[in-house]
Image (cartoon, helix red, strand yellow):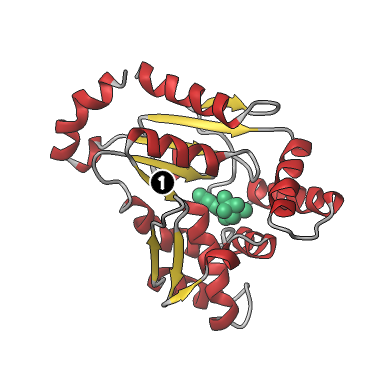
Amino acid sequence: MFGWLNKNRGAALAGQDIIPVIAIDGPSGSGKGTISRRVARTLGYHLLDSGALYRLVALAAEDACSSLQNTECLQDLARKLDVRFEASDTGKERVWLGGQDVTERLRTEETGAGASIVAQIPAVREALLDRQKEFRKPPGLVADGRDMGSQVFPDATLKIYLTASAEERAKRRYKQLKDKGLDVSLAALSRDIENRDRRDSERTLAPLKPAMDARLLDTTGQSIEAVTKTVLDWVAEL
Ligand code: DC
């Protein structure tokens, strides 16, 4: 089925440049995290959750920097980030920052908002660039983020931009948080999503927008299984 991938496995081992990358970008709540994890697992590829790196900088800054405006401190943190991603039995990985398990703190709305603020700072983006590129290892990589296809892996084998209506994205996030037993309001979540979309889209460096050669995939009203299948079908066509 994935003939192209097998054909290129040997070549991929020979040089970094041709290790396949499937770049999956899109706004928060578009389903990129879930879809990327499933696609990576099916293909046996590595996974880069680039948003987690920005979230980690925001988290580390809570202790180390006086504010999220302290560019020098944030850049230094981003360069030295002592992070470990550890696979767990449940299939969801645990994340360690400087020896502390931050898996749950990493996923809060507050950390997401902090990540979106530090992600506006060019020095932080620059400091995280090489770290992201290091995830490109044989047999291949699924990279999830905002600028995977446009900036970090412009030569990606396949670029996908996932979207969904703002209303549906807020509802998905609401369900996720409710399922975790958290008390949240749909109206507040919709506002947060709008603010985050605006900040991520309007920043000057690497704004959230589809790469010129990305395939658009609107996931509104589609199941996780259906979206995963579409992506895998596109991979198989390569
Ligand atoms: O995907 P996420 O919700 O974990 O991302 C958190 C924030 O990090 C997001 O609002 C913007 C920023 N981000 C980014 O600027 N570039 C990326 N490649 C990934 C995330």
Mark 1 nearby-residue class (10 Å; few <14, some 14–19, many ≥20)? some
Image height of 125 relative to 19, above or below = below
Ligand 1 contact, mark 1 (Cβ < 8 Å): yes
1 sits to left or right of 100: left
Image height of 108 relative to 204, above or below = below
150 sits to left or right of 7: right
Kindly identify the residue that appears in the image at 52 percent across and 75 percent down: 60
Whether residue 93 appears in this view of the structure is yes
Q: Position of residue 150 (x, y in %)?
A: 47, 39
Q: Amino acid at mark 1?
A: Val
Whether residue 205 appears in this view of the structure is no
In which quarter of the view is residue 7 placed?
Answer: top left
Helix, strand or loop at disc 1? helix
Q: Position of residue 12 (x, y in %)?
A: 20, 35
Q: Position of residue 192 (x, y in %)?
A: 76, 54
Q: Quadrant of the N terminus?
A: top left
Pick whichever, 145 or 109, lies toward us. 109
Image height of 43 relative to 188, above or below = above
Kindly identify the residue that appears in the image at 43 percent across and 43 percent down: 143
Instruction: Say which residue label 1 marks.
Output: 152
Kindly identify the residue that appears in the image at 46 percent across and 42 percent down: 37
Q: Quadrant of the C terminus?
A: top left
In which quarter of the view is residue 209 placed?
Answer: top right
Pick whichever, 74 or 166, lies toward us. 166
In which quarter of the view is residue 22 placed?
Answer: top left
Kindly identify the residue that appears in the image at 61 percent across and 83 percent down: 66
Q: Position of residue 111 (x, y in %)?
A: 63, 64
Pick whichever, 123 or 190, lies toward us. 190
Image height of 196 relative to 148, above or below = below
67 sits to left or right of 146: right
Q: How many marks?
A: 1
